Image: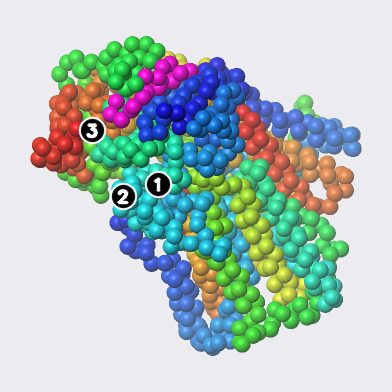
Amino acid sequence: MSIDTFSASRAQRGLRDLPVPLVVIALAAVIYITAAVITGQTNQISLPGLSGLLQRTVALGLVGLGQTFAILVGSIDLSVAALISSVAVLASYLMQGDPGMIAPAILACLALALVVGLVNGGLVAYWGINPLIATLSTGLILQGVLAAGYTYLSGRVAPEFQALAYQAWFGVPLPVLLLAVLALLAWFVLAKTRFGAHLYAVGGNPDGAKLAGLRVERFVLAAHLIASLGACVAGLYLAARLQSGTPWIGRDGVYDLESIAIVVIGGTALSGGKGGVLGTLAGVLLFASLDASFNMFGVDAFLKQVLRGAIVIAAVAVYAVRNKGHVA
Amino acid sequence: MTAALEMRGIGKAFNAVKALDAVDFDCRAGKIHVICGENGAGKSTLMKVLGGSYRPDTGEVLLDGVPVRFQHPREARAAGISIVHQELSLLPFRTVAENIFTGMEPTRWGLLDRQRMDERARALLQRLGSAIPPRALVADLSIAEQQLVEIAKAMLVDARVLVMDEPTAALDDRDARSLLDLVVRMKAEGVAIIYISHRMPEVMAIADRITVLKDGRRVWTRDRAEVTVNAIVTAMVGRELQDFYPARAAAAPGLPMLEIRGGKNALLRDIDFVARAGEIVGVAGLEDSRKSALAQALFGDAPFAAGEVRIAGRAVAIRSPREAVAAGIGYLPGDRKREGIAPRQSVRDNALLTLQAMAPALASPDGGARARPKVDQNLRDMDVRAGDFGQEIATLSGGNQQKAIIARWLMQNPRVFVFAEPTRGIDVAAKAAIYGTMRDLANAGRAIVMVSSDLPEVIGVSDRIVVMHQGRIAGELPAGAEEGAVMRLALGVADPAAAQEMAS
Amino acid sequence: MTAIPDTARLARRISLRGLNFAFAIFVVLYAAIAILQPNYLEAGLFMNFLRRAAPLAILACGQLYVILSGGFDLSMGAVVTLVVLAASMLIGGDAAMTWPVIGALYAMGLAVGLANGVIVSFLKVPSIIATLGTMLLVNGLALAWSGGAPRGDLPDNFRNLGRLVLRDVPLVGTLPVAVIILAAVVLLTGWGLHRTAYGRRLLAVGDNPRAAELAGVPVKPTRISAFVISALAAVTAGILIGGFSGVSVNAGRGLELQAIAACVIGGAQLLGGRGSVVGALFGALSLFALFTLLNLLGLPQALRDSLQGVILIAAVGASVLRHRRST
């Protein structure tokens, strides 16, 4: 990535000054409201309806937060879907419905996420393996072990844990609050701390960052750890919501591809060094409203998958198509 | 006066190759010491040792008489050695202040202190004579402004020793002059400056002392007053370089090979341009003259939107490089590594690439039994130095890569050749070879268009000089024109006095 | 500088080593299989092995083109699934429909390949994301079309392409039709890559697309054709798989990653510029031999995925280390 891309500059900045996240949020609102009006389901625009919409954003949003860090630093994480499934299965297996096991189960899942993040980061940053291949492979490894061992790993989360997914404080569902808090934390780290500034530096120009004395590998490793943590929290949430985990949760939800799509559509560049958390939140809102609209129209499940694939491509294409260079 | 910096007996080898052989070097505060040498002479290696990126095998480095040993560039920076690199290390989507402070951001209670960052950045830039706002995005700055930010970054640590590696390579004459003024000002502040450059006018303008390196050894170090350009070039190359620039065209130019009338696109206007068989037309201009846009338009990379183009009298539409090739135009891009070579392919395949590009998809990849020996012959004629033409082209030196690319075009036999910055980053001996090649190509009946930011090169090589100014052709000058005259046109200035001042 | 000729020769030895590496691995693995089950050394069983490995090898040959162009084709598996499901529904047990339907299947493959190519070349979406997207899309289409439940039977003349074994063939005894098809694909893709101008263009595009463009190479059509070839290979593999595995909604699952692993084992450089068809072939055979060996050892099927992950990391990691040492 080089400096001569700067020539897309002053003259064209006018329209670009519109912050991308706001445009995306506006688009999400338009789509949702239009769908509700057309299908006559205007009850969707009420408070419970919107609450439901926000609930839809939680799982993908949590993964997206983590993925944002990975992409900002110039890497990417395709193992999130497998990790989500693994965490969901592990949590329900360890809890076996016993509230006393909630804390140990959560700790174990965090530990798993830590290991996966370390492996991903290690392969990418220290061994120099292409992040797509590295994370795709670790995802495969997790998926295989999970599928092979699932017969021995069935379980159920504790009812108290499950209840957390359905509670609300002051009308706001607890999971949504969780997402908001974590998003705020992520934004703060990126915008206000040295660590955040260094992440942008490493992603924007790794050679320059190295010359400035930054240890590039450490930041890539940290970013992958954060990405895995995001997937872990998402997995725990899904386990709570669905009562137990299966090896297919991650894949069925297409969390790997969609988390990338929401990050990109929010304005974070795939090459790294540009973007942030607000964009990701806007992206997940857009996808949630699209999903809700499809439901309002009663779109068949398989057809939804077709549309999902098309939307992901379109989401990335909207930014990518401006790229003047060659893409492989 | 004790030397601010002294390097004694520095040796460094990579595998079997000796990059540096017992090199002595010293630099005094408030003085500019220029290092000259061909590519591969060891200049960058020496600076990397100084900057802490490499550890020397033998010898030592002393700062103010005290031996130092750096394990990492950070330590060198902390010791007051700042290096401004050739490849810009800036982050395009961050602000100027954020870029300057990368790695050493000021904090308050553990959080980024943006206010202090902006203030200090502004002060630093002002010291360098610039009014760039600290909150501007680097992506919105011109190359010259980015270079300035890069220098500000280097100056942040109150450098005692400042190393600049070919800082004017990507700048046009006007911005280069501003940079040189800046360097002289920093010298007045007492900084010891090490300046690496190929450009003789610059060297002679600012050096206090000059060191020439060749093949990893120091040839000599002399005061500027005792030195001539010829002496430097001779020392760099190891032999007398008579007639650095080849003789002008033997005969009068022939028929027009390339004609453009009313050429126009987003960046260019009113382009009326002719290049005749047998002549070398040089295109000069400042950084914003859009001369590179002209080269790209000629080759269809960023085509004309309006206007008429004729090749050898025939009207053609050139909307892509492929159409340009088909019409009989060849193109040597300015950035070899990014735009010229396919690094992992063999030298031979690189030389065959255009043939392969234009042949039918299912045709034989080396053009058949007759073409195979021809490509090797072309490579040899161009004097491409390679152990084996089947080896990866990335292993060749820059000059040899450039020659291989020219050989590629010889297979096509184009009528018009467009050279964009043909000798950028190439050492002196290879430069002379390329000038000779251009003249040979022209003498064989082709029209050569040479777009170059190197003014002496344009004046020395061209039969005719076209000067551009902000997307238009400002005027034409005959061969051997005076630098001042070119500069006047390039600046769009009619006032001789002002132009005279700029040129001096 | 004296270092240059040595690195040149070393570099070429490395790329040849990639080829020899895959071949050597295959020999070792097959030997291990033979130790466990000596009758694998018989010509008949060897042919059978080749027959079952043929789809993977064909996929690898197609994937190679995309990898050489600098990208990845993750939609291959979905195309296989589509082919299998579409074939069963369109032919509907009527043998006369077989060949027209096969024509239609290749047309579908062509469409997918074109879509992939256009999305990457014109919309500038990175191929990983683009082909993951088309994978979702194509899978969804296949499922929507078949309602999630495969119907219809594949007639014998279709299935024979994958199943039929010619007997009393001189020299080898038995010769599966699938192996003949494999040989044809290998010859075709090998010729296309190594003996045509197109192949060199492809390598240049993967190596440095900007330089290729400025040398006059038609970059976009070259890249699009690579995706088309990959998709057509997937259709061919799908036909063979439908032949001997029957119809299932999971027919193609995971095959694209196996194909990538095969290419990497065979010495192809990820992100373009270097690779060979024979390398991909032996990479695929090695991978299939590994799976066969592990089956014989009683390893659960599901662990195949994990194994592939490890192989991918090992193969790519090894080439990274090799590259680091030689620069």
Q: Name the residue under label 1.
A: B152
Q: Do the residues labelled 1 and 3 touch (CB within 8 Å)?
A: no
Query: Dot 3: what SS?
Result: strand
Label 2 neighbourhood size at 10 Å, few (<14), some (14-19), many (20+)?
Answer: some
* Residue that badge 3 annotates: B283
Color style of the picture: rainbow
Residue C306, can we see it?
Answer: yes
Q: Which residue is drawn at 56% across and 33% down?
A: B68
Up-down relation of residue C312 to residue B483 (above or below) = below
User: Residue at 89% of width from left, 37% of height from top?
Assistant: C37
Figure check: A66 above or below C307: below
For the residue marked with disc 1, what is the amino acid? Ala
Image: magenta residue range: B204-222
- Does the magenta-highlighted stretch encompass residue B209? yes
Q: Which residue lies furthest to the front in this view?
A: B1
Q: Where is residue C50, by image quadrant?
A: top right
